[in-house]
Image: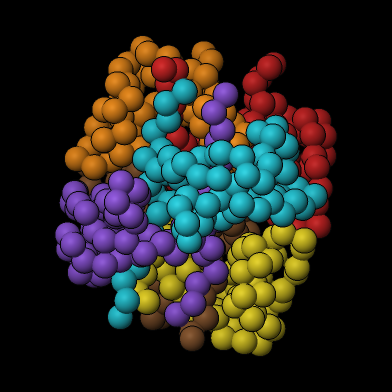
Chain colours: A purple, B cyan, C yellow, D brown, E red, F orange
Amino acid sequence: MKISARNVLPGKVAAIHKGPVTTEVTLELAPGLQIVSTITTHSAEALGLKEGAQAFGVIKASNVMLAVDE
Amino acid sequence: MKISARNVLPGKVAAIHKGPVTTEVTLELAPGLQIVSTITTHSAEALGLKEGAQAFGVIKASNVMLAVDE
Amino acid sequence: MKISARNVLPGKVAAIHKGPVTTEVTLELAPGLQIVSTITTHSAEALGLKEGAQAFGVIKASNVMLAVDE
Amino acid sequence: MKISARNVLPGKVAAIHKGPVTTEVTLELAPGLQIVSTITTHSAEALGLKEGAQAFGVIKASNVMLAVDE
Amino acid sequence: MKISARNVLPGKVAAIHKGPVTTEVTLELAPGLQIVSTITTHSAEALGLKEGAQAFGVIKASNVMLAVDE
Amino acid sequence: MKISARNVLPGKVAAIHKGPVTTEVTLELAPGLQIVSTITTHSAEALGLKEGAQAFGVIKASNVMLAVDE
């Protein structure tokens, strides 16, 4: 499947914090560069996410803001 | 200002594609690792974004999906 | 690629309205049931979307609201 | 109230999974076609959602991605 | 229609900036308090939005970030 | 830090409802005008949010829908 989301970032699952409905997953993209995702716990289990496993962070461009130092 | 968004990723503006209302900005986080953002053209101008300038990509964790290879 | 997004809805491209940065795509899921998506024009072209082609609408569960009649 | 969201999809509540802050709701749009939503538990209760009840899934077009088979 | 979105904010349309696909609308909630929305141009026209008209800003709670001064 | 998000609304924290992964925060923008946000519990703690404290609601324009009375 090829998706329209402009950001498909390969990484490795660094941490999983499971809640009853929502699960927080930390993905390491590169040494010192991590992103955090919240998905449903159902999805985290359906994907079989485990610490150390390869995964992708997927982000629609319209959900990326920009900021600059003042 | 400190923001709740879990992902504040430093990078360098690699490309700007301006439309009448929406502008697409490519940010290089590391060599070979880029993210794409769409913001209002008004914001792109208000931030003074220029190719080569330092900027941050800011993404709320609930907007990050995960995927795995099948 | 298997994605965490809970909603991956198969359909057929019914209409494409291209703008300079953003493109609006109408997807028919079933007779009389359409969804509308806006993605970057770059993505619409990269996916090779054409009227009549098969495609999926992909929506993260946290982006689906619910409503009831009053 | 008429809303700008391009996608207002009528369905029937198929399942509700309540957490302390977030609730996951499955809506059946047609036989075999379901969508999943996560909203606050407060909203799920305020709307009086119950299995079998009529409800609408409401999705802003900018939150719909597209994908194609490779 | 009663919606799960926790934020339904009444205001008055202060400005409309129409693009080919996306339209930017400024809504005044109170004197000196404005919010900006981008919706499809198709929706802006379907709602019949005009400067000075009453309208509501509708925002899902999961799309509201928080920030504090440092 | 100056952010591209068009909506940065100053207010006062009126209520905090903490869950295991997600926390719901109510922000009072003006007397009688509140907005509700859901962020990760980790962020709520990292920002040191407390009832009565000053904070900002931050919302990307593409996440603001509009509605009109029918």
Decide which of F53, A31 is in the foreground and name it. A31
Residue in the picture at 72% in, 59% down: C21
Q: Is residue F9 visible?
A: yes
Decide which of B38, A44 is in the foreground and name it. B38
Residue F59 x, y percent position in the rendering: 54, 36
Query: Which image quadrant for residue B3?
Result: top left
Residue C61 x, y percent position in the rendering: 39, 58
Decide which of D13, D32 is in the foreground and name it. D32
Residue in the picture at 51% in, 40% down: B56
Residue in the picture at 50% in, 72% down: A3
Q: Where, quadrant-wise, is the N terminus of chain C in this rendering? A: bottom left
Side of E35 relative to D42 (left or right) = right
| Up-down relation of residue F44 to residue E25 (above or below) | above
Residue D53 x, y percent position in the rendering: 38, 60
Decide which of D42, C15 is in the foreground and name it. C15
Query: Which image quadrant for residue E46?
Result: bottom right
